[in-house]
Image: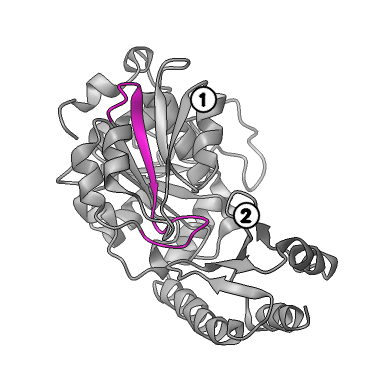
Amino acid sequence: MKNNSIKTLVRENILQLQPYVSFRDNNEFNAPVMLDANESPFGDYNRYPDSTQKRLKSKLAGLKNVVPSQIAIGNGSDELIDLIIKIFCEPKKDAILMMNPSFAMYGFYAAINENKVLKIDLDENFEIVKNDFLKTAEDPSLKIFFLCSPNNPTGNSVADIEFYLQNFNGIVVVDEAYIEFSGQKSSIQLLNQYSNLIVLQTFSKAWGIAGARVGMAYASEEIINLINIVKAPYNVNVLSQELILKTLEDESRLQKNVNRILEEITWLKQQFEGIPCISKVFSTDANFFLIRMENVDSVYAKMLEEEVLTSRRDPAIPGCIRINVGNRAENEKLINLLKGI
């Protein structure tokens, strides 16, 4: 960040907010009689969850080499994206910046908040042209730059993230939903160097727990305090917190999942070679491929007819379909179908 302190970037009304504080979660008791929150005294899940997610943050802090006060937990990363925009972007005045193409939800939540969405078109290799970035970043309305790395739907990682941290006069959000597949170092290691950095990660991809809807933001204590002020008090339910904590007891699970996906990626790359309807397979650092098809309309229609569900990216990315890496049986069905087209 060039000049601004974080406080100057925050909406004034957010700075005036008084957070909802759960008395129970901010005090220690030995054997309390809980008559404070209008809950039912009956049932296995009759109590509200810990609104501060203490146990989960403590576990994640050890895994990521940060302190718990540098972590915010969200109902998926989507909630955190929404909250970040609400904190820093004044409706009808401020703007966000994102790559094009990239994850559509950045623009979606900005539009809900009545913020402009500026986009940097990526080059033919789906990389940012730095001069284009520097020119666009001069817009004084910009408050947040969303960098998805590896990028969805293109699959490639963003090079030289520090360049954007140093040359953007606002908040840089590095969305690392697919980082575990890439072999790239997480930008979490840069938190102590850059006060304008927020790193998003998730349990939905490599951990294989999309149904729990749990995402994390890693940032300075100042930014995390702002997220905690704005978020709903009980935004992550008891069942999800317990499931994630139980999953984290087996620290080998993540690498096992990643290794299986990487094996399937290697197998699929070999199988894609020579399939007539495929004109290009783009390199990937994620758990999906972006593939350019000959006659994309008929290929997509045939896959849909056979109930092989993929994500069509044409016409935004001409001729392209994004295909998630499945298990071997699913991947074999995909390959056999493509070979027959």
Please state the horizontal and vertical placement of residue 327, each as a whole percent of the image: 63, 78
Residues drawn in magenta: 138-157
| Residue placed under numbered mark 1 in the picture | 36
Contact? badges 2 and 1 (CB < 8 Å): no
Callout 1 crowding tier (Cα within 10 Å): few <14, some 14–19, many ≥20? few
Q: Amino acid at mark 2?
A: Arg
Do we see residue 31 in this rendering? yes
Query: Which one is nearer the viewer's eye here, 64 or 3?
Result: 3
| Residue 173 to residue 156: above or below | above
Give the SS element for disc 2: loop
Prevailing secondary structure of the magenta residues? loop
Please state the horizontal and vertical placement of residue 161, each as a whole percent of the image: 26, 51
| Residue placed under numbered mark 2 in the picture | 313
Query: Which one is nearer the viewer's eye here, 79 or 139?
Result: 139
Please state the horizontal and vertical placement of residue 295, each as a whole percent of the image: 72, 66
Query: Which one is nearer the viewer's eye here, 242 or 157?
Result: 157
Query: Which one is nearer the viewer's eye here, 87 or 67?
Result: 87
Please state the horizontal and vertical placement of residue 109, each as a whole percent of the image: 53, 32
Q: Is residue 186 rendered magenta in the image?
A: no
Q: Nearer the viewer, mark 2 or mark 1?
A: 2
Residue positioned 34% across, 27% down in the render: 142
Q: Amino acid at mark 1?
A: Asp
Residue 105 falls in image quadrant: top right
Find the distance from the CA under tag 2 to the CA under tag 1: 51 Å
